[in-house]
Amino acid sequence: MRESFFKVQQYLGAHTRKLMCSIVLGAIFVCSASFCSIDSGTVTQDAVASGQVYLETDEGMVTIDRMESGDDTADDIEIIDEDDELSVSANDLVAFDDIEYQEKASDDGANFAVAEDTVIVDENGNLEEATYEDDWALMLINKEHHIPEDYDFEVATIKGAVRSDVRIVPYVKDLIQAAADDGVQLYICSPYRDLDKQEQLFEKKVRFYIKQGYNETDAYDLASQTVAIPGTSEHQVGLAFDFIMEDYQQLDEGFENTRGGRWLKENAADYGFILRYPKGKEDITKIIYEPWHYRYVGVEAAKEIMSRGITLEEYDKEIGLAD
């Protein structure tokens, strides 16, 4: 026993330096692991092992299940938050048969698509003033122009919870597929939403600012710069989408510098979509710069708006659709 004790002492003395290094490395590992770990009150270690991505936003933790790189099965990217919004990939969109949408729209008495060169002519052959019903793609929706109470349209389900006005399904499908053909994988994270959902989102943002110390009036004003006031959101009429990428899910200005942000700005107009809230036009749109938010207006109008760097407010005013 005594002999064994002395052997241990001799071993420790000879390997003191190695043992100290091991202890230091172990301490560093434990500290780094604690910084990288997810709060156990938010998610479980089983969830971490499943390959999920977690984003901390000003509205709370957002959990994103995303495809593994190189996965061709086009599994959905699901954003799990209080809004229960579901994203969809290019392959999901392409998999849908246009005829199914056309038949559904026809059964409900709605038009599947409207030709880009449609003109409004009265019974005497004279041009008529366009109305929201006739010129739905150019309908102006903002704080001064609320969604008309009698406005009606057909909603199509693209995939899961992703829905839009049935008339723009072919255009968003072509846009996402064209981006994919160019090596840019876009995902929809905010499609059509109804009035109840818009009210929830707006009230949530107001509460966020109140918690920051703002009074109700200021909180309301600040919230309206980032979330449309219920009744004034383009998402409510199924004409707008918010886009993200697999490697960039934040809805912030940084999206403009991603491949997806650059691709959309350069090519979205070819499919009838415009950057709805551009930088430097906040005094006109009353909404902050949102490089992720694109709105369908039709190919001809989109190309003019994007090439000139103007807003839908300015364009509709020029053609007489808005004051």
Image (cartoon, rainbow, N blue to C red):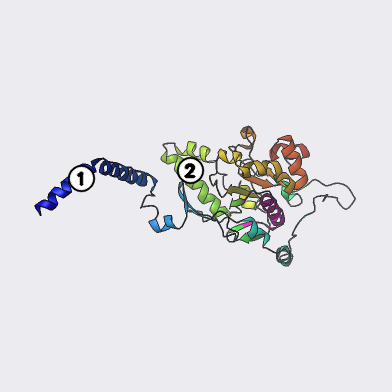
Q: Which residue is mark 1?
A: 12
Whether residue 275 is visible here, answered yes or no, is no
Could you say which is closer to the camera, residue 38 or residue 210?
A: 38
* Quarter containing the C terminus: top right
Give the residue furthest to the right: 124
- Quadrant housing residue 307: top right
Q: Name the one closer to the observer, 8 or 53.
A: 8
Along the line of sight, the residue nearer the viewer: 266 or 317: 266
Identity of the amino acid at label 2? Answer: Val
Asked whether the beta carbons under mark 2 and mark 1 sit within 8 Å of each other, the answer is no
Question: Where is mark 2, residue-wise?
Answer: 206
- Measured along the vertical axis of the image, is residue 38 above or below residue 93? above
Going by the image, does 39 lie left or right of 82? Answer: left
On the image, the x and y values in percent for residue 26 come to: 31, 45
Q: Position of residue 315 (x, y in %)?
A: 73, 38
Q: CA distance from mark 2 to mark 1?
A: 63 Å
Q: Which mark is drawn over residue 318?
A: none
Q: Residues within 10 Å of mark 1 (few under 14, many from 20)?
A: few
Mark in the foreground, 2 or 1 = 1
In the rendered image of this protein, does residue 17 appear above or below residue 148?
above
Mark 2 surroundings within 10 Å by alpha-carbon count, few (fewer than 14), some (14 through 19), many (20 or more): many
x then y, percent, for residue 250: 53, 44
**Residue 283 located left or right of residue 135:** left
Quadrant containing the N terminus is: bottom left
**Secondary structure, magenta segment, majority class:** helix
Whether residue 257 is visible = yes
What are the residue bounds of the magenta stretch? 163-185
Quick check: is 181 in the magenta stretch? yes
Q: Which residue type does callout 1 highlight? A: Leu
Q: Earlier in the sequence, mark 2 or mark 1?
A: 1
Outermost residue toward the left in this view: 2
